[in-house]
Image (cartoon, helix red, strand yellow):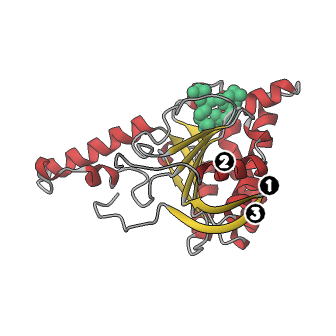
Amino acid sequence: MGIFQLPFRKKSKKTNVELSNKSLTLVPDHVAIIMDGNGRWANERGLPRFAGHKEGMDNVKRIVKAANKHNISIITMYAFSTENWKRPKPEVDYLLKLPKEFLNTYLPELIEENVQIKTIGAFNLLPEHTKKAVQHAIEKTKANDGLILNIALNYGSRSELVHSVQSIANSVKEGNLDPSQIDESTIANSLYTYDLPDPDLLIRTSGEMRLSNFLLWQSAYTEFWFAKEYWPSFTEEIFEQALLDYQNRKRRFGGL
Ligand code: IPE
Ligand code: IPE
Ligand code: MG
């Protein structure tokens, strides 16, 4: 995690697409998604929870494809939180097997689509097999310069901030940083997202309206959009509705 200035990036990008008789002319640069409701999706169908997670995994690919089509630069997907370890072990094991299954199935297509894979979260605490599959995909896609698929794996904002404070405190202790020099960029640059702009649009599915420890610092001025559909039923059309709504939001960042 380096201490350096982020390059300037545009908050939104111009486009021109006709969607359900409306024009999409401005898309967010960075979209973050809390993919929630896999378990309830399965329950309603009399299926075990893991069937919902499997269906949710396939939906990641569909929405990544749609994001790519609309020229979005970054999509951050909340796949496993630092609190999800509280679930029964078989479910945790299954969730941590999914990245490997996802990449086994879709990596060739993602490479073809010029997608670059990244992760945020406490990566080292993941099981070996998960780390290996993800590291392989990061390596294989590192030269791609299309959509960034940023997977939040074992991610939690509070733990991220604890690590940030520890690394800054260490810099002070070693005499490389004076406390008076600490500013917002010092903190931003010590987060897992140090090389990414803040999300412009954050979507949560399944009707829940909370952040669940996702991108607390980074979403200070993010636009929120909530879908009632469970993640496996969150279609490209609903995603496009979120994009259409986003372009009408007036982002003021505290100004007038
Ligand atoms: C989202 O679906 C996937 C993860 C949190 C890993 P859930 O598993 O939370 O599904 P619900 O919310 O119980 O329906
Ligand atoms: C948030 O969903 C985490 C992910 C989508 C990975 P949860 O289902 O874990 O959130 P809570 O427990 O309902 O807040
Ligand atoms: Mg949930």
| Label 2 environment density (alpha carbons within 10 Å; few <14, some 14–19, many ≥20) | some
Query: SS for tag 1?
Result: loop
What amino acid type is highlighted by mark number 1? Answer: Ser
The answer to whether residue 135 shows anywhere in this view is: no
Q: Quadrant of residue 233?
A: top right
Q: Nearer the viewer, residue 66 or 167?
A: 66
The residue that disc 2 covers is 242
- Left/right placement of residue 32 relative to residue 19 reads left
Disc tally is 3
Q: Is residue 138 above or below residue 124?
A: below
Q: Which residue lies at the image location 15% right of the left edge and 49% below the top edge?
A: 172
Q: Position of residue 94 (x, y in %)?
A: 71, 37
Q: Which residue lies at the image location 66% right of the left edge and 40% below the top edge?
A: 35
Any mark on residue 20, and which? 1
Q: Position of residue 73 (x, y in %)?
A: 57, 64
First-in-chain label (2 vs 1):
1
Q: Label 3 vs label 1: CA separation? A: 7 Å
The answer to whether residue 69 shows anywhere in this view is: yes
The residue that disc 3 covers is 18
